[in-house]
Amino acid sequence: MTIAEISKMSVLERLQTMEALWDSLTREPTGIKSPKWHEEMLSDRKEKIESGHAKFISLEELKSKYE
């Protein structure tokens, strides 16, 4: 399937196709491996939370930073 063909699809059709693709990928026997940097980032965030140094903000605060 080409980008041109995908572009002709409705948003709903593209979302349904994307969900079907993701579902098929998650059913692969080997699974999807996360990159090393992802594991490191999660570990760092967990450390900050456990040590009490994590700062949490609401979704609204986050959105306002990028408006």
Image: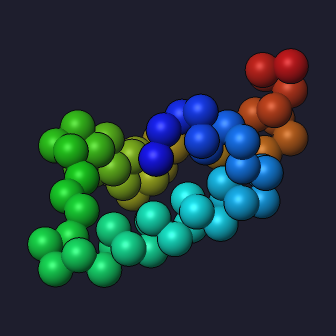
60 sits left or right of 57 in the view: right
20 sits left or right of 56 in the view: left
Colouring of the image: rainbow
Residue in front for this viewpoint, 44 or 7:
7
Note whether residue 58 is visible. no
Give the image quarter of residue 44.
top left
Q: Going 46% across and 47% down the picture, which residue do you hit? A: 1
Q: Can you say which quadrant of the picture contains the C terminus?
A: top right
Image position, residue 5 (x, y; %): 60, 41
Q: Going 23% across and 37% down the picture, which residue do you hit? A: 37
Q: Going 77% across and 51% down the picture, which residue do you hit? A: 11
Image position, residue 7 (x, y; %): 67, 37
Residue in front for this viewpoint, 20 or 2:
2
Q: Is residue 63 above or below residue 30?
A: above
Residue in front for this viewpoint, 26 or 2:
2
6 sits left or right of 34 in the view: right
Image position, residue 14 (x, y; %): 66, 54
